[in-house]
Image (cartoon, helix red, strand yellow):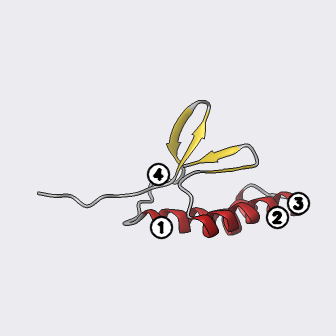
Amino acid sequence: MLLPAVFMVSEREDGKWRAHDPGAAYATPQGARDSLAAWLRVMAPFTLKLDDATRAVYAQAADRLDDRRRNALSVAERRFG
């Protein structure tokens, strides 16, 4: 039986990769990228209580992710892959 590929977002923390959102899985790499971009724009400012300047940095990172379809991204000393 062939199982479909599953994609997720991970974050590098303390020298180890961990699931960014352990319950989330996506059918395509683009789905995982879109989820991370949405988190950077909407949920990160709310959950991390970001100030306006840092919120803008996260939004710019989401724009870079959308523009270049990256598989890795760094923002505010956080590394996602």
What element does badge 3 sit on?
helix
Residue that label 3 marks: 53
What crowding class fits label 4: few (fewer than 14 Cα within 10 Å), some (14-19), or many (20 or more)?
Answer: few
Task: Give coordinates of residue 35: x percent, y percent.
Answer: 54, 66
Q: Looking at the picture, which amino acid does disc 1 mark?
A: Gln
Q: CA distance from mark 4 to mark 3?
A: 28 Å
Asked if the residues shown at circle 4 and circle 1 are in contact, with their CB atoms under 8 angstroms apart, the answer is no
Type of residue at label 2? Ala
As measured in the structure, the alpha-carbon distance from the residue carrying label 1 to the one carrying label 2 is 23 Å
Tell me which numbered mark, 1 or 2, is placed earlier along the sequence: 1
Of label 4 and label 3, which has the lower sequence position?
Answer: 4
Q: Which residue is mark 1?
A: 30
Callout 3 touching callout 2 (CB < 8 Å): yes
Badge count: 4
Say whether marks 1 and 2 touch (CB < 8 Å): no
Residue 40 image position (x, y, % from top left): 67, 62
Give the x, y percent position of residue 3: 21, 58
Residue at the far left in the pictured view:
1
Q: Nearer the viewer, mark 1 or mark 3?
A: 1
Q: Secondary structure at mark 4?
A: loop
